[in-house]
Image: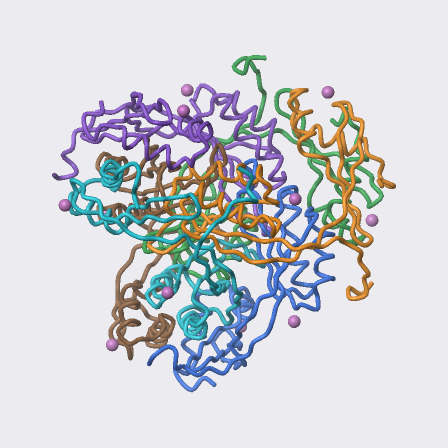
Chain colours: A orange, B cyan, C green, D purple, E blue, F brown
Amino acid sequence: KKLSQQVVKTDADQILVLEANIDDQSAESLAPVLDLLMDNGALDAFFSPIQMKKNRPAIKLTVMIHPADQQAMTYLILKHTATVGVRYQTMGRTIMPRHFITVATRFGDIRVKIVNYDDLEKYSPEFDDCLAAAKAHDVALNQVYLAVYQSMPESGLS
Amino acid sequence: KKLSQQVVKTDADQILVLEANIDDQSAESLAPVLDLLMDNGALDAFFSPIQMKKNRPAIKLTVMIHPADQQAMTYLILKHTATVGVRYQTMGRTIMPRHFITVATRFGDIRVKIVNYDDLEKYSPEFDDCLAAAKAHDVALNQVYLAVYQSMPESGLS
Amino acid sequence: KKLSQQVVKTDADQILVLEANIDDQSAESLAPVLDLLMDNGALDAFFSPIQMKKNRPAIKLTVMIHPADQQAMTYLILKHTATVGVRYQTMGRTIMPRHFITVATRFGDIRVKIVNYDDLEKYSPEFDDCLAAAKAHDVALNQVYLAVYQSMPESGLS
Amino acid sequence: KKLSQQVVKTDADQILVLEANIDDQSAESLAPVLDLLMDNGALDAFFSPIQMKKNRPAIKLTVMIHPADQQAMTYLILKHTATVGVRYQTMGRTIMPRHFITVATRFGDIRVKIVNYDDLEKYSPEFDDCLAAAKAHDVALNQVYLAVYQSMPESGLS
Amino acid sequence: KKLSQQVVKTDADQILVLEANIDDQSAESLAPVLDLLMDNGALDAFFSPIQMKKNRPAIKLTVMIHPADQQAMTYLILKHTATVGVRYQTMGRTIMPRHFITVATRFGDIRVKIVNYDDLEKYSPEFDDCLAAAKAHDVALNQVYLAVYQSMPESGLS
Amino acid sequence: KKLSQQVVKTDADQILVLEANIDDQSAESLAPVLDLLMDNGALDAFFSPIQMKKNRPAIKLTVMIHPADQQAMTYLILKHTATVGVRYQTMGRTIMPRHFITVATRFGDIRVKIVNYDDLEKYSPEFDDCLAAAKAHDVALNQVYLAVYQSMPESGLS
Ligand code: NI
Ligand code: NI
Ligand code: NI
Ligand code: NI
Ligand code: NI
Ligand code: NI
Ligand code: NI
Ligand code: NI
Ligand code: NI
Ligand code: NI
Ligand code: NI
Ligand code: NI
């Protein structure tokens, strides 16, 4: 199959990426910002280690948001971090459409996310379900994932 | 307070971000480039650790500049690093307006940057002033920062 | 179950850890060293990003070896990297005893490593077998792993 | 003051450092291990990004413990991560003796840790107290820290 | 020479940058993706260590491609990694025109890439040639590079 | 040549490695510590990015010293960083004996370090000499290195 001839049907949208370099705030005071941003509607947020001028072992904060949330999320970043500026740009995004099934395992019911793109189909046991089940039964996460895989039909997942 | 109703007044501008992946130059020869770029007008410059093809533990150089400086800064990157190409994109930037006050401490006068955005006000003792004072009095930087915080009025900073 | 009362039976040995900081060699020339050391008997070898004096974005090389190989491995590091010194220390090591089973899947036979420790039992499909099968059948690695998990008995693996 | 003539009085103890390289487990399944280890008595635990053989972007787990906890903590690491081995070594540790004071601020009472070593005295507002106060009053963490610094006496902290 | 007066003649083009954050896939299963993408026409591809929500020590995959390859490369990323979405943006690129010369050394013929930009001229011995020569003669890579440098004319390289 | 039969003559010594995890200090205030420690006799000092409990993007400080300097260097770390403890261990070290030659180039005299181990001989132009020459003649560092390589005799360096 030649790559250029694939026909794909997929969702797509535009996101806004916000960034700030942080060199004047401690790691412990910066840490709660990720959860705070996710709780306020960020699509994703993460830290990257960077090495700045004057040998500073600093952190880059990246936040992906719906463009409509720019003003509100910029406010939160400026309020809760030490940065005095936030830079931004627009990115396109290709997203695999998704739906869920529920799989019965010896550790209880676990949701499995099914995503599709062209002829691809991928499955992903819901992490939060697996973690809750692992804690409830005092087993390793891995045990729960194995149980889910073994309880899923090999084909016809949709 | 609902996030979408905030009214903010702020400065904004456009910057250009230049990037290059460096896998054919030693760390010691790459290191002076950050200062050299900052001394020639870069707004910021930093290294990020990346893992490239063929298991190369390489470095990404990122430089933020005024768009008018693109040709000159590209020249400097090509001259002083081993890269054979520089990629670039434009980003918007939200900046907190700033002004300075001077705070008298037992370690001498220290400038404090005051930045504002909507109802936010943040203070930031000038790092270079604090470092100079710490060295002059042979105390830890932390001691100087504490003295500045204790010498600042708690409110009415502007 | 109180932690301190667990009784474990396990293998243990002593290894030697060699380290060198590299700031005077390019990423592309350093990269082949990992394979070279693994091919000559290193137990493991890896790079870590570090930030050295003078703002150098450098790399720490760590190599774990059998103590009897110290002289030979030190020679290889000194020959194939730019470092002028190698530091070392001894570490103990707790190892889970392991054996293999073979699992038949629709992508062919795949070995699965079974490791034990106290009441723990973990399984790990052999990566190289899975990668070879994925390439041979032009499917994602993930598909092969799923097939292995679904072809393994849920219990009684040993 | 010549460095070698300093006389210091300090606490000291021995710790055990456990390490494992993780290349066969997802980030989301590895993440809960840090809290789990801390909750079971680890003195500290952290991840470092490493670059392993075959271009694997892997993670090194480091756990610092009381030597008496070795068997129990090794068990937890082997249970909750995919690693099949744990390496370890002993380290000495110099610790600054500590005590606490309570500082009254406009955001409520905040504990401040005071640590000493030779002629050094350092203060550290308790992070958890500050975070709780910041959330309770919907202000940035930074505001709380500033209030603590301004409510502390500049000298005679002990 | 004032920077803004430089006249440069150079190649330039547009590239597309694809990115995905990976937190639900092991390092060993992610590793082969770099080679796979390079083999299918990616201009460059690399991993960056990132720290995501819930304390996940994750990896960002970045792939630079010709814009015409977007659909095919997106398909490969979605097939061979666990991500359910790929974000993208366009970047400009300044490239130094290049040509090759061949240098005769005591380790055989080695190609040297010569690149130019304005008044700059840089040389770069072909890594693959040097590595092959180093292996063939069982010497360190460094020895081969030194031989190339000593066999190149100091000026008039073009 | 079989690896275990190599006979090597080399210098060796013992060093002390000091480490501290920093999560309660900004990057800008931590940065000057590397130079300060090097200026006070550290053999080497570097930062590593680490990911600690509670999602803290923190820094590990590592300092290598002569064992006799332990008390003085511990004092400096405790004074100039926010850490309340320093851990340490002894490591052995294999060092290549070194001497210097001076090479005349069109950019002036440059010292070249020559190191030996068994049948190995490596050369390393002194970085500080090369940087000074590059600045004095306004050329890229790379130009100076090339000039040094071309001015060195290919053999008989010692
Ligand atoms: Ni949304
Ligand atoms: Ni259950
Ligand atoms: Ni400017
Ligand atoms: Ni003063
Ligand atoms: Ni062996
Ligand atoms: Ni097959
Ligand atoms: Ni304890
Ligand atoms: Ni209150
Ligand atoms: Ni092409
Ligand atoms: Ni040859
Ligand atoms: Ni010395
Ligand atoms: Ni000169």
Residue lying furthest right: A156
Residues A129 and E27: in front is A129
Residues B80 and B122: in front is B122
Percent x, y for residue E70?
Answer: 70, 63
Marker count (numbered): 0
Residues A64 and D4: in front is A64
Residues F1 and C52: in front is C52
Q: Can residue D150 be seen by looking at this rendering?
A: yes
Q: Is residue F155 above or below residue A36?
A: below
Residue at image position (73%, 47%) is C141
Tell me which image quadrant ligand 2 sits in.
top right
Q: Is residue D11 left or right of residue F149?
A: left
Q: Is residue D115 above or below residue A88?
A: above
Percent x, y for residue D107?
Answer: 37, 27
Residue at image position (62%, 20%) is C118
Residue at image position (77%, 23%) is A106
Q: Can residue F21 be seen by looking at this rendering?
A: no
Percent x, y for residue C93?
Answer: 51, 31
Percent x, y for residue E124?
Answer: 48, 73
Q: Is residue B147 left or right of residue D39?
A: left
Q: Is residue E11 left or right of residue F97?
A: right
Q: Is residue A102 above or below residue F118?
A: above
Q: Is residue E64 above or below residue F76?
A: below
Q: Is residue F28 left or right of residue E100?
A: left
